[in-house]
Image: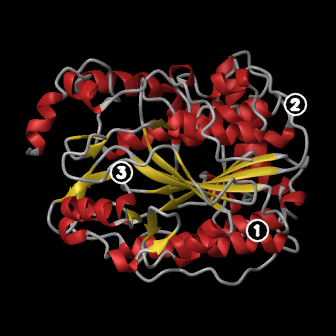
């Protein structure tokens, strides 16, 4: 059925005007000013006990075609897969076996090795949901679906907010760090770290802004890395700015006072972190890729490894940290994602090797998210925007070597699809809450971090030990 006909099925959804109303109401907290101010009414965090833990979120930006990363290997299932995937179907005899029923693409050797070593898990058919829904219910419009399905920014932001209702005004990582650190606790300053070349609302709305590192270095113009520009740093003009902000910290105007306090804290940050990268470790095996758009994935993951090598140099010894990594180039309308898949596999292998070299492989969990999946059928050379997709979780604490959830049928007229778009069976909230439970979040914390989690029977997908 043509795409325009599918859109007619969705006419009872929130229309564009409704969507804008939702996003604009949320966007108040996402403006530079409000993001800097943060929320003033956060609850106190639960106690953090035990060892250091970090999670590393890798965005496969553009919508990854995970159905050309994992395919059925048994004859009947493979023939149905080949029939719907047509010219982009992977060759059956090339697949790297991971279970009796499924195999990875032939250029995913590093990920196959991790899967065999029980360091990598697959989470099947994850996606944005308001509540559990079946393809029939989508077709009949008998239950609500996320607004602006198939739209890159909207669906990506729903992943970042972990909420498809349009009610959240902050990112899930910003909320999470607030629940793991009490208000005023200095270590929370270093809880969220962005090493990519883009900003993400995943971190917005918390008491503290995310730190943005471009490289494993603190220099005289480090303020560039925090988004303020060199004029706000150590120059004479920077000192003037700081004096102005200092004078406003006790202003009777509450917003001005809070803004000034936040700004002064950011201006002081390079001084607090001056020795952070003393004795930073260098790693081998990270590749810069060959056709990369933006900052290469390997460079970003190497930087995360370098930061982790000096994690004990952070002031106040933070026990929980969330990293964001962005892998560009997955919007494959007119091509297969062969290159992206191979580069992801090699980069994950190198990163896990680095963590093992540091002896913290059980303390760091890496996971993927994406805007959405792709259509089951090709448009000719590539695929179009979809909905549900498979995700990957890697680390020593992962119950790897397994596929979690129910693998959908990849075939023509699949009972698991709305036309040729898979309807997710695991929600974003359930997927992420599993990580936060491993982080140490209580049931109450999980419901606060993920306000729509209550709508889903699955609170823990089970992939974490």
Nearer to us of marks 3 and 2 is 3
Q: Which residue has dot 3 on it?
A: 373
**How far from the left and from the top, in percent, is residue 97?**
49, 71
Quadrant of residue 431 in the image? Answer: top right
Q: CA distance from mark 3 to mark 2?
A: 37 Å
- Considering only vertical position in the picture, is 260 above or below 289? above
Residue 457: name its quadrant: top right
| Mark 1 residue crowding within 10 angstroms, few (<14) / some (14–19) / many (20+) | many
Which label was assigned to residue 355? Answer: 1
Q: Earlier in the sequence, mark 1 or mark 3?
A: 1
> How far is the residue under mark 1 from the one under mark 3?
29 Å
Kindly check if marks 3 and 2 are in contact, taking CB atoms under 8 A apart as contact.
Answer: no
Q: Is residue 313 left or right of residue 388?
A: right
At 24% from the left edge and 65% from the top edge, which residue is drawn? Answer: 82
The reply to whether the C-beta atoms of the residues labelled 1 and 3 are less than 8 Å apart is no
State the quadrant of the N terminus: top left
Label placed on residue 47: 2
Say which label, 1 or 2, has the lower sequence index.
Answer: 2
- The kind of secondary structure element at disc 3 is loop
Q: Is residue 415 left or right of residue 165?
A: left
User: Does residue 299 appear anywhere in the picture?
Assistant: no
């Amino acid at each position: 059925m043509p795409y325009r006909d599918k859109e007619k099925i969705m006419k009872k959804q929130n229309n564009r005007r409704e969507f804008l109303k939702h996003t604009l109401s949320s966007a108040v907290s996402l403006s530079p000013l409000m993001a800097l101010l943060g929320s003033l009414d956060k609850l106190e965090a639960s106690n953090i006990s035990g060892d250091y833990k970090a999670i590393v979120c890798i965005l496969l930006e553009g919508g990854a075609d995970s159905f050309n990363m994992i395919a059925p290997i048994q004859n009947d299932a493979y023939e149905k897969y080949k029939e719907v995937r047509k010219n982009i179907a992977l060759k059956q005899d090339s697949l790297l076996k991971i279970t009796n029923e499924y195999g990875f693409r032939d250029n995913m050797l590093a990920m196959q090795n991790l899967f065999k070593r029980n360091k990598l898990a697959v989470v099947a058919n994850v996606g944005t949901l308001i509540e559990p829904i079946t393809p029939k219910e989508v077709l009949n419009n008998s239950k609500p679906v996320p607004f602006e399905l198939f739209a890159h920014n909207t669906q990506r932001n729903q992943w970042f907010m972990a909420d498809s209702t349009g009610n959240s005004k902050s990112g899930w990582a910003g909320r999470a760090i607030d629940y793991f650190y009490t208000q005023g606790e200095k270590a929370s300053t270093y809880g969220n770290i962005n090493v990519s070349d883009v900003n993400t609302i995943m971190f917005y709305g918390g008491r503290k802004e995310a730190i943005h590192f471009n490289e494993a270095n603190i220099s005289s113009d480090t303020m560039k890395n925090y988004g303020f520009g060199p004029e706000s740093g150590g120059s004479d003009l920077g000192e003037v700015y700081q004096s102005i902000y200092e004078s406003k910290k006790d202003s009777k105007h509450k917003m001005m006072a809070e803004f000034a306090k936040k700004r002064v804290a950011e201006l002081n940050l390079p001084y607090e972190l001056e020795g952070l990268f003393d004795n930073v470790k260098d790693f081998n095996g990270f590749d810069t890729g060959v056709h990369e758009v933006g900052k290469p994935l390997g460079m970003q993951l190497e930087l995360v490894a370098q930061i982790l090598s000096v994690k004990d140099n952070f002031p106040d010894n933070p026990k929980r940290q969330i990293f964001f990594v962005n892998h560009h180039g997955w919007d494959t309308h007119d091509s297969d994602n062969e290159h992206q898949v191979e580069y992801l596999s090699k980069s994950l292998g190198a990163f896990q090797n680095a963590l093992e070299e540091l002896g913290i492989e059980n303390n760091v969990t890496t996971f993927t998210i994406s805007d959405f999946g792709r259509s089951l059928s090709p448009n000719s050379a590539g695929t179009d925007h979809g909905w549900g997709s498979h995700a990957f979780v890697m680390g020593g604490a992962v119950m790897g070597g397994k596929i979690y959830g129910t693998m959908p049928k990849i075939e023509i007229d699949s009972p698991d699809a709305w036309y040729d778009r898979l309807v997710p069976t695991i929600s974003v909230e359930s997927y992420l809450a599993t990580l936060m439970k491993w982080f140490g979040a209580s049931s109450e914390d999980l419901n606060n971090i993920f306000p729509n989690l209550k709508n889903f029977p699955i609170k823990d997908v089970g992939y974490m030990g």
